[in-house]
Image (cartoon, rainbow, N blue to C red):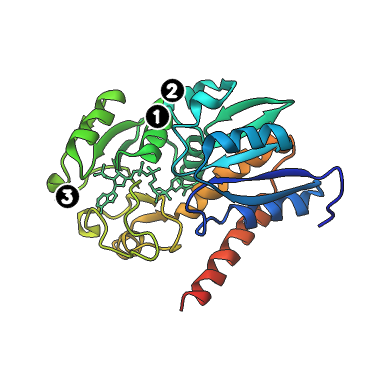
Amino acid sequence: MKIDCSTSLYGVLGYPLSHSLSPEMQNAGFRASGYNGVYLAFESKDLEGCIQGIRALDIKGLSITIPYKECILPFLDEVDDVAQKIGAVNTLVNRKGRLVGYNTDAIGAIRALEQQLTLPGKDCLIIGAGGAARAIGFALKERGVRLRITNRNETRGERLASGLDCDFSPLSDMGRIQADLVVQATSVGMYPNLEKPPISPKALEKGTVVMDIIYNPLETRLLAGARERGCITISGVEMFLHQGAEQFELWTDLKAPLEVMRDAVLSALEQRRHENR
Ligand code: NAP
């Protein structure tokens, strides 16, 4: 990787960041495309200071992650329509000093799902009511998918369901799930807390498409159970890859080298698995 006076600086902003695979993925993309950029991890609890830093140092773009996806909005000069409707930004683009916010989580999830099924007219259960569930729900609704939400905190779940104009069911009602698609959008099952999934894989029917947005581990307990029941499973890596590819394209105006970026994520995950043994 060539680094010189023209190298553009990118990164991920949030805390904690030790779990992030974005540096490996984006730097592999930059290298493969011959793009003169470098992507770092900026772990900080000072959002306002970071905004000044972005402007002062002319940082060209950032991935925005927990806990800043929502509270960064007032600091931006412009927020695109999709991010505005979702109420969360996961991508910042510095356009000649104008900080513009986007949300690529939504389109990342759609790209991952469209590899396995045609969305319009399908029935989908979303497990979760946090920021990721909201982004995915919004994008699925726009594509004509009939939604149902379930969530541990029922008030929060009902609020999201009302915002998406769809039904809510308590987790305790998930005895048997009749849906074409199930999206697991909670943080349950993420390394190192490999807990029981919020729904039992036994509730799933053969042939259902099941996506877990957790990407570490590659196959969560929910996905392993779903696979054993004959479901079609999609790992969170696919959503992660596609949201990252969208970011890459917003920043560079180049086509994202998807396979190179996927290989980089998978090998970073594999390396972490060895380190954690
Ligand atoms: P969030 O806003 O904090 O929402 C967390 C969700 O998880 C809520 O629905 C919460 O339910 C639920 N939850 C947490 N602990 C639970 C438990 N023990 N039992 C049942 N439900 C539980 O987080 P987020 O931004 O939506 O992100 C959710 C996860 O998705 C994170 O792990 C994140 O890393 C991952 N993610 C992946 C991608 C990707 O590209 N693959 C993109 C974005 C996010 P309550 O409302 O009941 O608290």
Q: Which mark is residue 248?
A: none
Label 1 or label 3, whichever lies nearer to me, is: 1
The disc, 2 or 1, on the residue closer to the chain's N-terminal end is 2
Looking at this view, name the residue that lies furthest to the bottom: 277
**Residue on which disc 1 sits:** 138
Q: Residue furthest right?
A: 5
Kind of residue indicated by mark 3: Arg
**Badge nearest the viewer, 3 or 2:** 2
Name the residue at 41% across, 54% down. 214
**Quadrant in the rendering for residue 221:** bottom left
In what element is the residue under mark 3?
loop
Query: Which element carries disc 1, helix, strand or loop?
Result: helix
Of the numbered discs 1 and 3, the one sitting upstream in the chain is: 1
Q: Earlier in the sequence, mark 3 or mark 2?
A: 2
Dot 2 corresponds to which residue?
A: 85
Mark 2 and mark 1 in contact? Answer it, CB < 8 Å: yes
Q: Which one is in front, 197 or 38?
A: 38
> Label 2 to label 1, Cα distance in Å?
8 Å
Residue type at mark 2: give it: Lys
Check the image and report above or below for 52 versus 276: above
For the residues labelled 3 and 2, the Cα–Cα distance comes to 32 Å
Choose between 102 and 213: the one closer to the eye.
Answer: 102
Residue 222 in picture, x, y percent from top left: 31, 59
Which residue is labeled 3 in the image?
176
Quarter holding the N terminus is bottom right
Q: Nearer the viewer, mark 2 or mark 1?
A: 2
At a point 59% along the width and 45% down the height, the residue shown is 244
* Residue 105, x across and y down, in percent: 49, 39
At a point 45% along the width and 52% down the height, the residue shown is 236
Instruction: Specify few, some or many for label 1: CA neighbours under 10 Å numbering under 14, 14-19, or 20 or more.
Output: many
